[in-house]
Amino acid sequence: MTEPIDRLSLYRRYRPQRFGEVVGQDLVVATLRRAVAGGKLGHAYLLSGQRGVGKTSVARVLARAANCLTPEDGEPCNRCESCQRILHGLSLDVVEIDGASNRGVDQIRKLREEVAYVPAGSRYKVYIIDEVHMLTGEAFNALLKTLEEPPPHVLFIFATTEPHKVPPTVISRCQAFEFQPIAEDAIAHVLATIAEAEGIALAPAAAELIARRSRGALRDALVVLDQLGQGGEVTEEAVVDLLGLPPLSQVDGFVDALAGRDADQALAIVADLSGRGRDLALFLEEAATRARDRIIAGAPELIPIAQRLIELRGELGRAFSRRLHVEMAIVALCGPPAPRVALSLIHISEPT
């Protein structure tokens, strides 16, 4: 049974139902549409890419399109009996498997037994295996035997965020598609469209900030919009508070301090962030991104600063004290602070 649509989260409510609704994966969906329209579907597909870019959504659309009774130029009609059964989770011929929790050889052996049976009423028996890279080596070996001689009525669709963990022998028997991170402007446009449809007041600056922080994952952006949209107008300040982001003025002040070798100011900003419990790793990401933006806008002198910020962000995972590590990096870049600042830092570090 499906949940009432008004109770679904935004990312589920606005999940693509046709290839044409998929955002940012034009080459992938165009190729799959042509394969469906031309009756030239392969027996196995591997969809790879970061989380939240549409892999599972495309897999489900492909499952419907392959079994649709009245396909429209490679698109599922979503109206016929087959499409409706699949949409409502009632089809026995479309099976979704979580590779993380069904990773053993026994589960794959059971699957091998099932594929021998013809579909219960569809053209294809479709197996969608999410996070397929989580299968064990024995499970992959068992799966490989089916992939080598697949029954004509079976379609495998594998999705993974880590294709390098899938054995080459399996990849070689699949048609592989790599999904790209979705462009920020495309995510911001989708957010604005959905916000208007849902009656959510979304400031353009807030949409741009959500899109930037989603790192190419539309699903993550919709989760943030869903959270903030329940509390009234979605402003840039609300996004900053929810995600724990530093104000742009503070980020610019930090970058300027590093560029001007002003250790006093840079250390004061780090002290303020630490005192308020802010994530220094996230702050460095924002600072590096902002430096990048300013370099593109015509400030090449910030290139060494951006490079060092990126390196510093990577070093924090191994640091026993993030604040100390960042402060020492600031001193190395800018030179020692004025004596009064150094004394105040010592006082702050003393146990009470």
Image (cartoon, rainbow, N blue to C red):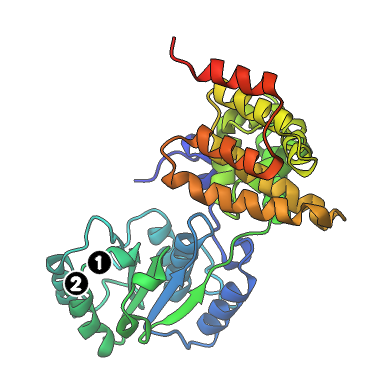
Residue identified by numbered label 1: 135
Q: Position of residue 189 (x, y in %)?
A: 73, 50
Secondary element at image label 2: helix
Residue 109 left/right relative to 175: left
Residue in view at x 65 percent, y 32 percent: 239
Check the picture and name the quadrant holding the C terminus: top left
Which residue is the extreme one toward the left? 106
Which residue occupies the foreground of this view, 254 or 336? 336
Residue identified by numbered label 2: 139
Mark 2, Cα crowd under 10 Å, few <14 / some 14-19 / many 20+, is: some
Q: Position of residue 37 (x, y in %)?
A: 55, 82
Which residue is the extreme one toward the front? 339
Q: Quadrant for residue 201, please give it.
A: top right
Residue contact between numbered discs 2 and 1, judged by CB atoms under 8 Å: yes
Which residue occupies the foreground of this view, 195 or 207? 207
Mark yes or no: residue 153 visible: no
Mark yes or no: residue 344 visible: yes
Residue in view at x 62 percent, y 76 percent: 27
Residue 105 left/right relative to 279: left
Amino acid type for the residue under numbered disc 2: Ala
